[in-house]
Image (cartoon, rainbow, N blue to C red):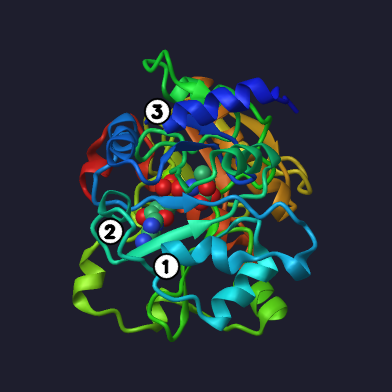
Amino acid sequence: MSTHSSVVIDEAVQTLRDGGLVAFPTETVYGLGADAKNPEAIQKIFTAKGRPSSHPVIVHLAAPEKFDQAVIDWTSLVSPWVRDLSEDALKLINAFWPGPLTLVFKKDKSVLNELTGGQDTVAIRAPAHPLAQELLRKFKGGVVAPSANRFGKISPTSAADVRSEFEGMLGLMILDGGDCEVGIESTILDLSSGDHAVLLRPGIITPSEIFTKTGIKVYQSGDIDQNKDAAALPRVSGSLRAHYAPTTPLRMYSAGRVLDALSEFPDIKSRVAVAVWDSDSSLSHEGHPSVHFEEVLIPSDCGTFASRLYRSLRDLDQQGWDLILFPEPPPGEEWDGVRDRLQRACFGSGPSSINHDNN
Ligand code: TXA
Ligand code: MG
């Protein structure tokens, strides 16, 4: 893993203070950071990403320096950003921060509308990556950071990925922290209703893990009556049907049914990449007279799969396949995060932008 001298971190801190953008690693994906108190800096993020300004961004905070969990004072860190910090919120924070869990609160009035997309809530997380922590600690403030990709595209899990997403932005400062360990974006829980914790985006931290560690029951957004105003707002941009998408068509196949997935593409004669669980035997028995399959092994362990998913999609997208096929992830909550990302990637995939314009 790459490391940075403190001189480079200092330069990144200065860039943030000057209202510039800094891409930095987190344990989930790379983020494109700006000072959460600077409206012009936040605007630069939306412009760079091509992201609609109504889509809110997450505020990233440094974990306090002491790592003796018993004495970490999260309250004074989070309080300035939120209207109130419930007992449940503190339980969640103590159990999972720093780490890949984002919490949505009613916002303090000082929180800029530019970062909340005009909503009265704010999303906050404390990333676990040491480089992110060092940056945040030295900056001594909140840093807003969406994933460092163009809107609707695959999130970056390495510094080189960020570079290729923002090729035109020559001056963009990118801190290189190696490959992201988690590989998909943080789990998002909405605590803003004050009643229920509602899952807005599945991730590597699952509702049952949350229940086990805190006793807090997590509701799916479908379980809760949403009032109409709230439902009309794009609360989670990743909730658009098309997202995380490669330009090569991508589809999922159910076990043993690769040929069915092909029926949608009668003209494809060759160059089909088929991802296959590394625990499975090969596809060779599924012969097809005119289509050439190329197998790509993918990890059948859920955590490893998540950590390599975006890497695989990016690499396959570069290789000039006519079609990419992925197996449907197995049922089970621990697969919800990757299933969610794969479904959106399939929906948004392909060279045309028609799918994106539809949502
Ligand atoms: O793992 C992550 O969360 C990464 C790393 C960089 O920290 N960040 C990330 O940011 O995924 P982004 O902007 O790509 O996705 C954040 C999601 C968006 O879908 C946004 O709509 C949602 O969080 N979000 C932000 N503020 C919100 C709020 N107040 N209410 C509901 N959703 C919110
Ligand atoms: Mg994103």
228, above or below 175, in the image? below
Q: Is mark 2 within 8 Å of ligand 1?
A: yes
Contact between labelled residues 1 and 2, with CB atoms less than 8 Å apart? no
- Residue to which mark 2 is pinned: 234
Task: Please state which of residues 119 and 314 is positioned toward the viewer in this rendering.
Answer: 119
Q: Nearer the viewer, mark 3 or mark 2?
A: 3
Q: Evaluate whether residue 341 shows in this view.
A: yes
What kind of element bears circle 2?
loop
Q: Which mark is residue 82?
A: 1
Label 2 neighbourhood size at 10 Å, few (<14), some (14-19), many (20+)?
some
223, above or below 95, in the image? below
Contact between labelled residues 3 and 1, with CB atoms less than 8 Å apart? no
Looking at the image, is mark 2 or mark 1 earlier in the sequence? 1
- Residue to which mark 3 is pinned: 18
Residue at 75% in and 56% down:
66
Looking at the image, is mark 1 or mark 3 earlier in the sequence? 3
| Rendered-image quadrant of the N terminus | top right
Q: Amino acid at mark 2?
A: Pro
Label 1 neighbourhood size at 10 Å, few (<14), some (14-19), many (20+)?
many
